[in-house]
Amino acid sequence: MAVNVPGVIVMVVFYLLVLGTGIWASFRSKRKQKKSGATGMEMALLGNRSINVVVGVFTMTATWIGGGSIMGGAEMICTPSRGLTGVIILFLSYTVTFITGGLIFAKPLRDRNCMTMMEPFHTKYGKAVVAALSLLSVVVDMMWVSATLTGLGGTMSVVLDLPYTLCNWISAAVVITYTLMGGLYSVAYTDVIQLVLMLVSLCICVPFVMVSPYTLDISQTLMNSTLNAPWIGQPEMKKTWILIDDFLFVVRKLQHG
């Protein structure tokens, strides 16, 4: 397949924009650290607790709703046993976790000046329990990182026609670079850029999908199983407990993450 020149240009601009934003944020982080006298650990993990509300909302949204979630949701809709019903359960669990985490855990942790979510558990239960919980959190985060890189690397591979593994390595290298340079500040500000670009890009895709000869009228695919499996899924009563179990499982996983 011939090289997609516009795609190459867009991907290069995207990575340079993200990397440049991360580097700029790292310098901003260092200036903030000098003015406030905060430790390097506080700046790297918490941004000295000085991230403004707008950036905070963007980075939290981007943390939960990223490339892995979008690609995973699209694949789930195309899976007959899941479909739209499964996606609704997935994103409902995201929403519940997000809201309960903010309302129940955020303020007490901030009032106690905790650096991590494990500190209250360390105070109450000791090192052994915290070690087990930390190991579980690391495993979950490793899975989450792999899902995120899968979404980004998969998109890059399709656009540039490069090996999938190479695209994943390039994506990982960019993320690691700006994270090590600026800590939370770099992550937060690059999340703003990535979320805005993601929203704009998805909106741009809509008219192209609607006029594509490979798409059908929604009324023909929602419930009609003649041409293909209905993408709404199969929300049958006998599957109610399975859906509830999926919901609680994802909520628990996200809370640990």
Image (cartoon, rainbow, N blue to C red):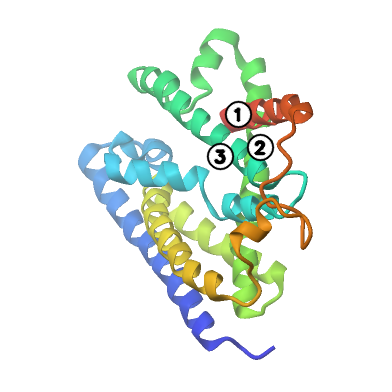
Q: Residue at x 51, y 11 (%)?
A: 123
Q: Residue at x 30, y 50 (%)?
A: 30
The picture places residue 50, in percent across and down from the top left corner, at 28, 38
Q: Nearer the viewer, residue 29 or 162?
A: 162
Q: Name the quadrant containing residue 41.
A: top left
Can I make out residue 169 in this image?
Answer: no
In the rendered view of the protein, which quadrant contains the C terminus? top right
The picture places residue 36, in percent across and down from the top left corner, at 23, 38
Q: Is residue 14 left or right of residue 76?
A: left
> Considering the numbered disc 3 on the image, is that residue within a helix, a strand or a loop?
helix
Q: Nearer the viewer, residue 39 or 201?
A: 201
Q: Which residue is mark 2?
A: 140
Q: Are marks 3 and 1 in contact (CB under 8 Å)?
A: no
- 206 versus 90 height, above or below: below
Q: Name the quadrant containing residue 32.
A: top left
Q: Which residue is mark 3?
A: 91
Q: Which residue is mark 1?
A: 251
Q: Disc 2 and disc 3: Cα gap in Å?
A: 18 Å
Which amino acid, by three-letter code, is at mark 1?
Val
In the rendered view of the protein, which quadrant contains the N terminus? bottom right
Which amino acid, by three-letter code, is at mark 3?
Phe
Q: Nearer the viewer, residue 20 or 79?
A: 79
Q: Are marks 2 and 3 in contact (CB under 8 Å)?
A: no
The picture places residue 58, in percent across and down from the top left corner, at 37, 47
Q: Earlier in the sequence, mark 3 or mark 1?
A: 3
- Camera-near label (3 vs 1) is 3
Within-10-Å neighbours for mark 2: few <14, some 14–19, many 20+: some
Within-10-Å neighbours for mark 1: few <14, some 14–19, many 20+: many
Which amino acid, by three-letter code, is at mark 2?
Val
